[in-house]
Image (cartoon, rainbow, N blue to C red):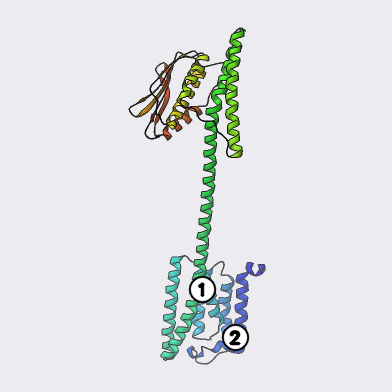
Amino acid sequence: MRWVRRHRPLVDALGIAVVSVVTAAVGLGEVWDALSILPEPVSPWWGVVLAAPAIVAVAAKSRVPRVGLAVAAALCAVALFTVGGIGTLIALLDLLWTVTLGAAPAARRRILVGCAAATAATTAAALLVTADLRVAVLVGLQLGALLGTDYWWATAVAQANELAELHRREAREIALDAEREREAALQRERDAMSRELHDLVAGHVSAMAIRAESALSLPPRREGDRAALRAVRDSSLEAHHALRSMIAVLRAGGGEFVVPPGLDRVPEYVEAARRAGLAVRFAGGDVDGIPFAVEQVAARVVQEGLANCVRHAAGGRVAVSVAPNDGRLLVRIDSRDGRPLVHPPLAGNGSGLAMLSERVRALGGSFDAGPVGAGWSVRAAIPLEAAA
């Protein structure tokens, strides 16, 4: 069967040739003798001879189907009114099916018009040759039925193939959409994890490195060294607790997650920055009744802003302000007269400020960070009603 599918045009041509020879041998090729315009009857084997070029066209239908259809149609017309024979008609139907199957919808409509025109022309020619309306109508009905059935079958198969291809394309699009959605979901999860890791761990690790470097850079002092060790211990315990909580949530899909900090943690951030060598001045307004989502983002802005000051404005003066104003919570961190840390090297990649900007804008607020005069300023304005 695989060989037959690979050589289908040759097999079809061979089958038509066999049918043509058999019908000639038993005299079936003479069924249209009444339409012959020849003066004397001829041997039915002339029908086989006339069908030979059409059979060759069937064998070559995978390469030149339209040319083969034109050749078969001309030979069939000649055979119908001369030597008869069924081989040319079968070849015509086979080539018509092949061309219709591979045609576009617009081309199939043109083929239908051509079939109708050929049927009408054959009926008229039969009437002219026989002068018998009944014979002409019968010939027209037979040819129309054969051509119409062949055309309908090929069209039905073509439309089924087109529908199947449409479903395949839709399935591929659905699969691609699902893959894109999966990748987007994974990226959102990665982004969320990176934000949480940065917020929960980066500040503590930076504080540990800075306090340890500060203790190492000064002459040994019992109280100062113990204070530095206590600060390192506290930061390491907080980072450890945060990491264990996040790992438990990621592994089990549950667990008690660390509650994100609110504005009540801002004094702790300020005190930690002072211990790191900054001269911090904090001014806070009445923040009672602030929505917790706004509190979280504001606390993160202060935490990240002070951490950046420790890294990039060591020893400088910093002013921190958190206060509601005109339906918004305004957060501002301004630093002056500092210098970047050389030891330990804690160069950032800007992701902290980028994530802060995402958080603030997610609540409909505005965020800006950049140089102002001789210093650096981080500013956020978060609407209170949008998060209520």
Where residue 167 appears, x then y in whole percent?
51, 59
Q: Are marks 2 and 1 in contact (CB under 8 Å)?
A: no
Q: Nearer the viewer, residue 167 or 191?
A: 191
Q: Quadrant of the C terminus?
A: top left
The kind of secondary structure element at disc 1 is helix
Distance from label 2 to label 1 (Cα)? 25 Å
Where residue 275 appears, x then y in whole percent?
52, 14
Label 1 crowd bin: few (<14), some (14–19), many (20+), radius 10 Å: some
Quadrant of res 23: bottom right
Whether residue 318 is situated above or below residue 80 in the rendered picture: above
Where residue 47 appears, x then y in whole percent?
56, 84
Circle 1 sits on which residue? 153
The kind of secondary structure element at disc 2 is helix
Circle 2 sits on which residue? 23
Residue at point 60% right, 86% down? 24
Residue at point 61% right, 12% down? 226
Residue type at numbered disc 1: Trp
